[in-house]
Amino acid sequence: MDYACKIFRCIDDDIPEAFLFNTMIRGHVKDMNWGKALLIYYEMLECGVEPDNFTYPPLLKACAKLSAIEEGIMIHGHCFKLGLQGDLFVQNSLINMYGKCGEIELSCDVFDQMLERSVASWSAVISVHASLGKWWECLKLFGDMMMSDEERRFRAEESVLVSVLSACTHLGALDLGRCTHGYLLRNISGNNVIVETSLMDMYVKCGCLEKALCLFSQMGKNKKNQLSYSVMISGLAMHGHGRKALEVFSEMLEEGLRPDEIVYMSVLSACSDAGLVDEGLKWFKGMKTEHGIEPTVHHYGCIVDLFGRAGMLNEAFEFITNMPINPNDIIWRSLLSACRVHSNLEIGKLAAENLVKMNSQNPGDYVVLSNMYAKSQKWDNVARIRTEMASKGLTPNLGFSMVEVKRKVFKFVSQDMSYPQCDGVHEMIHQMEWQLRFEGYKPDTSLVLLDVEEEEKIERLKYHSQKLAIAFALIHSSRGSPIRIVRNLRMCSDCHTYTKLISVIYEREITVRDRNQFHHFKDGVCSCRDYW
């Protein structure tokens, strides 16, 4: 670009043509000099050179990279004045630019105003929604695309399908993910490593580990990279196969692939999920000594989690205080969570104090500490924490569970029976509880951290979101079919016991993905071996 700039400045023409300015703008964008690309555009306007439809796509990309929404809106106005607002490439670039700047409504406005759409247009608007985590909207748009006239003339591109797979992954929508996989097989030959890794990740996180392993084994050795190994290692760990995950890591090393920071994150998480403390510490030390990788705060966080899950809270606290880097809020939050699980109020208070010093605005931190006080029957402290939350305007996150039934995803919130899909769920809950009595189930009311009567505690346990989702799935799915649930919070021990017994009574395999890992319930046993 240095040579290109010198040549550009030596041009004798009084007014260089648009082609030359466009070339310079594209060159700076390709060289990731976003600001210089904008400066060339302003110079172009000052010289009286009229931009054309080739000027704006790279220019809007520069605005997107800089999150320069004001410049992007101004350039959009220039496109309108020049009558270029109907150009397909310009419109696609506007959709991407607004989306990358977080202005999803403006992005959708451009898309809605398009008289003719291409696969690239659909790809742009779907990718924008995926990048902002709007997974429901992402799947709806893909459905609209498949029903549109344009789809009869164009095939969905791999980039669209990767976004759709990401949506299925986050929503736990296995059936929709399978449909997308089928579309790939029918329409696209020779998937690249990104698509294959996305498929593996989707199957792993939708609870179908066997299919992910099958895809992984079918990948040629020359196609497997650090990311594909990382997905498989972390996937095995999430499903309770920590030792198998370490075997895959050893296979990766034998293949001569050098692990990176992300792979080591997966390895340490595998050790943590399986309770392999010694192995985790060994690999943590080996990061630097064997592969020269300096541990980041995320790797230190994995070791804190490793100690915390194993109930080694004093070791975890000592490890944090001796870290060569400053612990962040995630590390203190991990320790606080472990203190709640293992009922260690003393260290929990220290973790909470450090979070307060960091000016934590996470309502979950206050809820965990409040619950620990409640479990110790210290109701004055509970009231103090709740008052502090209210004064800061913090609202606790409601627990919810999502279940896929007949290719639709349904969401249930704890204690909420107002949804239309709750018809019949109340009666099913009563039927399930009647059956559970014969299996010796007794609600663990110690988990209801409110100063209320025992009967009310039992009622509150009865309508946890996971139980509502299971009841709904039992009503609306065929006998013997598996049930797959995705939760936003960690599963409570009462729901864990409850689900184990339901898997026996109704002869169902029930897979639950909570915030930490997968639980596969079958014949009254959970894959986590009650370690989570």
Image (cartoon, grey):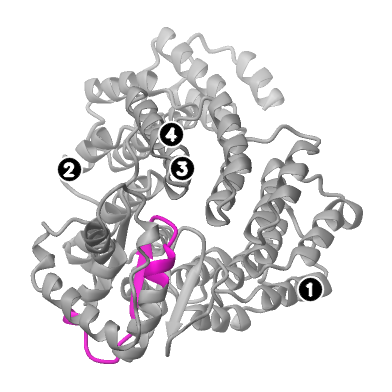
Report crowding for label 2: few under 14, some 14 to 19, many 20 or more residues within 10 A (C-alpha).
few
- In space, the residues marked 1 and 3 are separated at their CA atoms by 44 Å
Position of residue 367 measured from the top left corner of the image (x, y, whole percent):
41, 41
Q: Is residue 167 above or below residue 361?
A: below
Q: Quadrant of residue 197?
A: bottom right
Residue range of the region highlighted in magenta in the rendering:
475-496
Q: Give the residue pinned by disc 3.
A: 373
Which of the two labelled residues, at mark 4 and mark 2, occupies the earlier sequence position?
2
Q: Give the residue pinned by disc 2.
A: 112
* Label pair 4/3, CB-CB below 8 angstroms: yes
- The amino acid type found where label 2 is placed reads Asp
Residue 283 shown left or right of residue 206 in the figure: right
* Label pair 2/1, CB-CB below 8 angstroms: no
Reply yes or no: does residue 480 show up in magenta.
yes
Between circles 1 and 3, the one closer to the viewer is: 3
Between circles 2 and 1, the one closer to the viewer is: 1
The kind of secondary structure element at disc 2 is helix
